[in-house]
Image (cartoon, grey):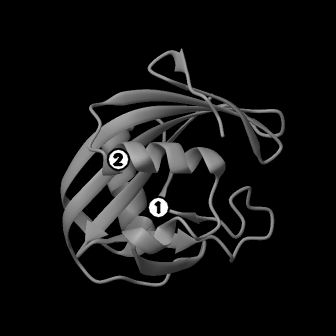
């Protein structure tokens, strides 16, 4: 199982999002997600998240929260444990990212953008300020086939 991080940086009611359009064989191609990536050997989730945010955005986070772990299961890609964070303070200036285009997107407009079906579940949990959670998302291709929150199956619409 891969270990990755994902961080939603907030400023003035908007999330800093990465529109993944620059890499050809990107499983997140054309999706809108927060900055993040794979943990390196011996990195904690916090260390990896801080490094990935800096590498992809040029920002150094000064205030963040570890919000939950998302377990991804797929019939196409390797399994993944994604460590999910939010941040609300930083220093530095945004720079270009080689994985996509960075944009501040108002939270109320985010739902209309292309994203993974399961992302909508954990984004709702973030907006509800849910306590630390474990979310399991199972995909068949790009279709969400199963989801469980803290070990209990969720009804999919």
Q: Position of residue 43 (x, y in %)?
A: 38, 38
Q: Residue at x 51, y 43 (%)?
A: 121
- In this orientation, does residue 42 appear? no
Horizontal side of residue 101 vs 117, given as left or right: left
Horizontal side of residue 18 vs 88, given as left or right: right
Q: Residue at x 60, y 44 (%)?
A: 118
Q: Residue at x 23, y 78 (%)?
A: 92
Quarter assignment of residue 24: bottom right
User: In the rendered image, which quarter contains the N terminus?
Assistant: top right
Q: Residues within 10 Å of mark 2 (few under 14, many from 20)?
A: some
Give the labeled residue for mark 2: 126
Q: Position of residue 58 (x, y in %)?
A: 35, 75
Q: CA distance from mark 2 to mark 1?
A: 13 Å
Disc 2, SS: helix
Give the labeled residue for mark 1: 34
Q: Position of residue 156 (x, y in %)?
A: 65, 35
Horizontal side of residue 33 vs 13, given as left or right: right
């Amino acid at each position: 199982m891969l270990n990755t991080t994902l961080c939603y940086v907030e400023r003035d009611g908007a999330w800093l999002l990465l529109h993944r359009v620059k890499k050809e064989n990107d499983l997140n191609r054309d999706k809108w997600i927060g900055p993040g990536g794979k943990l390196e050997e011996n990195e904690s989730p916090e260390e990896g998240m801080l490094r990935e945010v800096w590498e992809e955005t040029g920002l150094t986070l000064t205030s963040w929260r570890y919000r939950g772990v998302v377990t991804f299961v797929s019939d196409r890609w390797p399994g993944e444990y994604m460590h999910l964070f939010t941040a609300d303070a930083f220093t530095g200036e945004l720079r270009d990212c080689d994985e996509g285009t960075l944009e501040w997107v108002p939270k109320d407009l985010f739902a209309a953008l292309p994203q993974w079906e399961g992302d909508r579940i954990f984004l709702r949990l973030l907006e509800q300020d849910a306590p630390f959670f474990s979310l399991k998302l199972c995909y068949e291709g790009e279709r969400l086939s199963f989801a469980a929150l803290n070990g209990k199956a969720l009804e999919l619409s």
